[in-house]
Image (cartoon, rainbow, N blue to C red):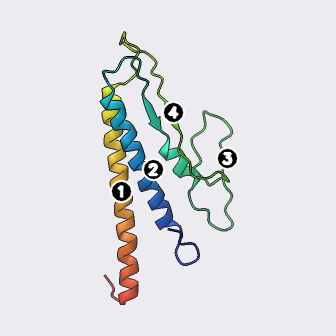
Amino acid sequence: METKGIFDRTIDLAEKALNMRGRRHELLLSNIANADTPNYKAFDMLVDEALAKEAPQKNGQVSLIRTDPGHLPAGGPTEQTLRPQAVHLSPQVTLRGDGNTVDMDREMSALASNQLHYKASTQILAKKFQRLRSIITGSRS
């Protein structure tokens, strides 16, 4: 759904965020399902980094670039498209002898965090549509 020209990019960005959060949810559930599979390597999707690259740019603003890994993320837009990366999680220390890298505490925490972000995106999108509806009907709610 491309809404360029009529609306700001909030709807497009929220749609992409919902799609990526849904895919990340499936990936995290796959990690949890394979918690007892020998030599299974846990994956995660870098959704926040992909969304930070897609943040809308206002006219006249300069986009910030992260020049050192120790710097805090700038979050500005870049020329790259919105493609989250699925990466192997490499824990510092694993206590398992079967080569499996799934950490249930980390996976459950990531799942809860992803769920909260998904819910926030749906609320932003619902509020946007509520505003559009009030504009169309002429109400002041």
Between disc 3 and disc 2, the foreground one is: 2
Which residue matches tag 4? 87
Between disc 1 and disc 2, the foreground one is: 2
Mark 4 → mark 3, Cα distance in angstroms: 22 Å
Residue nearer the viewer, 67 or 38: 38
Q: Is residue 132 above or below residue 1?
A: below
Q: Is residue 140 above or below residue 7?
A: below
As helix, strand or loop, the secondary structure at mark 4 comes to: strand
Please tell me which of labels 3 and 2 falls first in the chain. Answer: 2
Which residue matches tag 1? 120
Mark 1 → mark 4, Cα distance in angstroms: 24 Å
Residue 20 has which mark?
A: 2
Query: Residue at image x 66%, y 62%?
Result: 61
Q: Is residue 105 above or below residue 84?
A: above
Amino acid type of the residue tagged 1 in the rendering:
Ala
Which residue matches tag 3? 65
